[in-house]
Image: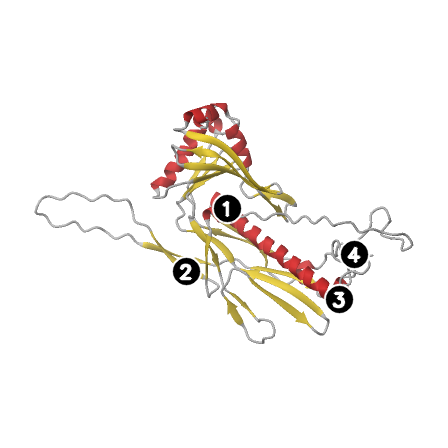
Amino acid sequence: MKLRQSTIVNRLQRGLTRPQNAVPGFNGNVSINETQTMGQAHIHRMPVTTFLRDTFMPSFQTFQTKHVMMDFYKSRQRAAPFVAEGSRPVNIRRDGFRTDIYTPPFINLSRPYDVDLLQQRTVGESVFGGLTPEERALIMMQNDYNELEDMAVRREEIMIGQLMQTGVVTVSGYVDDTATKVREDTIDFGFDNTINLTGTSRWNQSTSKKYSDLSDGVEIVRQAGWNPEVAVLGRGAARNLLDDSVFMDKYMDLRYAQFGSFNPQLNLQNGNGYAYIGRLTELGIDLYTYSAWYYDETAGILKPYIEADKVVIGARDLGEMLYGAITIIPEESINFVTVEAPRVSKVTVNRDTDTKSLVLKSRPLPKAFDIDSWAVINTI
């Protein structure tokens, strides 16, 4: 049976129909004269990975405002000059500082509920003698909150991945209430520590010098005053590295421990996670691959958080997450309240139509302490 359109489906969902419940092989009809058995439901909640956030931006700050301004000061690696004996001291010019203003983009998600929806059984629920609508509403809201939170976390991981690979965070969002107009903005951090390999230097060529490329990336970060500890390789870059017998024999063999070691380890959740490849001792970096994906609504495909042929080399804890304040009218109140938190949730109720919505809001933005604290190699 096709469910009618809910009276409270928010405008972001207009034009969409609800999923239908059907029994394959029976054309959606079940005979009540025959005994039936409800088997255990298979519920696959896709894993949410936060390898990039945990590695590079594990801490966070919240603010009482929508925007946040921050000053940055970076001294140069100057050496003291010599002066002639008995001369006056040399005045050293002061370095200036930079002020940036950050505006975290807005996440505003909703899941609606109405009487018709609560009359439909949930996944795995018995056809007869099941839950009451009240019990069903509590279960659905808990599951929906988990799903909305997962979506927000994935968006944060996408933003960190964009920042680490390009220095630019792309924000695409609706600019009207009907969710028909989309505007795309970019937050450019001015990143330029990029090594672009061409010709015979590309990693899919037998003439490439992968260790030298990794060493160049490490040197760029060290020149900025940071100690790189991690290299995250896209799946294509990792495959080309591991298929390079010269590199593996010379730098990753246990017989050459002064250079590095090869110790692959998996940390996967339902095929989604990261893998530790090994360590290049001389360079002081651990090598990882990030085997995790997210669903791109526009392209309609799964995309990796780290592009296949990129390598990101950087220090741990090189930045943090910023969360702007959220202003709402809380439940059972008529006053505006500004909440300072990574997530803000509430339940809205329309008593005239006996409808309800679960709302989740957030204003996340990744911020690096120093844009020079990592480097990127485009291997292809």
Identity of the residue drawn at 9% across and 44% down: 85
Residue at disc 2, secondary structure? strand
The residue under label 1 is which amino acid type? Leu
**Where in the figure is residue 166, as x and y percent of width and height?**
48, 44
Q: Quadrant of residue 72?
A: bottom left
Question: Which tag, 4 or 1, sits closer to the chain's start?
Answer: 1
Question: Which structural element holds mark 1?
Answer: helix
Query: Residue 196's spot in the image, x, y percent?
Result: 46, 35
The vertical placement of 361 against 86, above or below, is: below
Please tell me which residue lies in front, 129 or 73. Answer: 129
> Is the Cβ of the residue at disc 1 closer than 8 Å to that at disc 2?
no
Look at 36% across and 43% down and name the residue there. 226
Q: Is 82 located above or below residue 260 in the figure?
A: below
Closer to the N terminus: mark 1 or mark 3? 1
Residue carrying label 3: 115
The numbered mark at residue 69 is 2
Which amino acid, by three-letter code, is at mark 2? Answer: Met
Q: Which residue is mark 4?
A: 126
Sequence order check: which comes first, mark 3 or mark 2?
2
Q: Amino acid at mark 4?
A: Ser
Asked whether disc 3 touches disc 4, contact meaning CB atoms under 8 Å apart, the reply is no
Nearest the eye: 329 or 16: 329
Task: Work out how far the residue at label 3 is from the one at label 2, CA to CA, in angstroms.
Answer: 46 Å
Residue drawn at 57 percent across, 50 percent down: 154
Residue underneath mark 1: 52
